[in-house]
Image (spheres, rainbow, N blue to C red):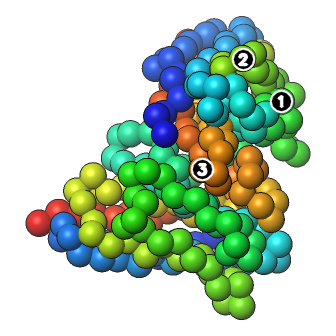
Amino acid sequence: EVQLVESGGGLVQPGRSLRLSCAASGFTFDDYAMQWVRQAPGKGLEWVSGINWNSGSIGYADSVRGRFTISRDNAKNSLYLQMNSLRPDDTALYYCAKVTNKVIIGEAMDVWGQGTTVTVSS
Amino acid sequence: QSALTQPRSVSGSPGQSVTISCTGTSSDVGNYNYVSWYQQHPGKAPKLMIYDVTRRPSGVPDRFSGSKSGNTASLTISGLQAEDEADYYCCSYAGSYTYVFGTGTKVTVL
């Protein structure tokens, strides 16, 4: 079964850091690009960041560029999101999603995890 | 990276058709045939319903169809069913390895 399991969320103070992880199983991880998408409480989906299969192509939303870093470890079948200088408006449920191809040029997200919650508050 | 514009809500009776619009710009929807649509039930993760503007993943009923004209993409649900009641989001590639989602539309089955 294809599965994505996020972890690492929690309550953190503004300005602090947090690292999210996404463990993938049931598919050949390094055959696919991956994305992070977030959803603030009661709000819509917001694309955060994406990475292609070999980490050679990476994109960020303007709202997180310079503060967040996406990475992957294909040997560990894992995707990461390092979040620095967190702000209250980063509070959201963070999903990792598998892309339908190796690249992140237009590809859709066909498998989603259940998300991990990040709350930024003092 | 402004969010794509969707109507806040649409509704229809069982068996009817509803269409959700998704309006972007010439930098995203209008420039790429990379529009996807996601269905999200309350408390659940999103589910891919349409990709590459018109293509349906395996397992998605053919009641769901997509199209695009200029800077506006559309999702049509024909033969509306109770289980189609959910939030729907469009998403477009916006260049330079970036994406943008729509504001979301709540579909209500009357």
The residue at the far left in this view is A122
Residue A90 appears left or right of A95:
left
Q: Tell me the tag on residue B54.
A: 1
Q: CA separation, marks 2 and 3? A: 20 Å
- The mark nearer the N terminus, 2 or 3, is 2
What residue did someone put label 3 on?
B98
Question: Disc 2 is attached to a residue of which chain?
Answer: B
Give the amino acid at mark 1. Answer: Thr
**Of helix, strand and loop, which one carries label 1?**
loop
Please state which of residues A50 and B85 is positioned toward the viewer in this rendering.
Answer: A50
Tag in front: 3 or 1: 3
Question: Disc 1 is attached to a residue of which chain?
Answer: B
Residue shown at the point (88%, 45%) measured from the top left: B58
Residue shown at the point (75%, 16%) measured from the top left: B69
Residue B88 appears left or right of A15:
right
Residue A7 is situated, as x and y percent measured from the top left of the image, at 47, 76
**Of helix, strand and loop, which one carries label 3?**
strand
Q: CA separation, marks 1 and 2? A: 14 Å
Dot 2, how many residues are within 10 Å of its Cα: few (below 14), some (14-19), or many (20+)? few
Give the amino acid at mark 3. Answer: Thr
Please state which of residues A80 and A22 is positioned toward the viewer in this rendering.
Answer: A80
Question: Disc 3 is attached to a residue of which chain?
Answer: B
Figure disc tally? 3
**Of helix, strand and loop, which one carries label 2?**
loop
B7 is higher (above) or lower (below) than A81? above
Residue B107 appears left or right of A42:
right
Query: Can see residue B80?
Result: no
The residue at the far bottom in this view is A75
Co-location on one chain, circles 3 and 1: yes
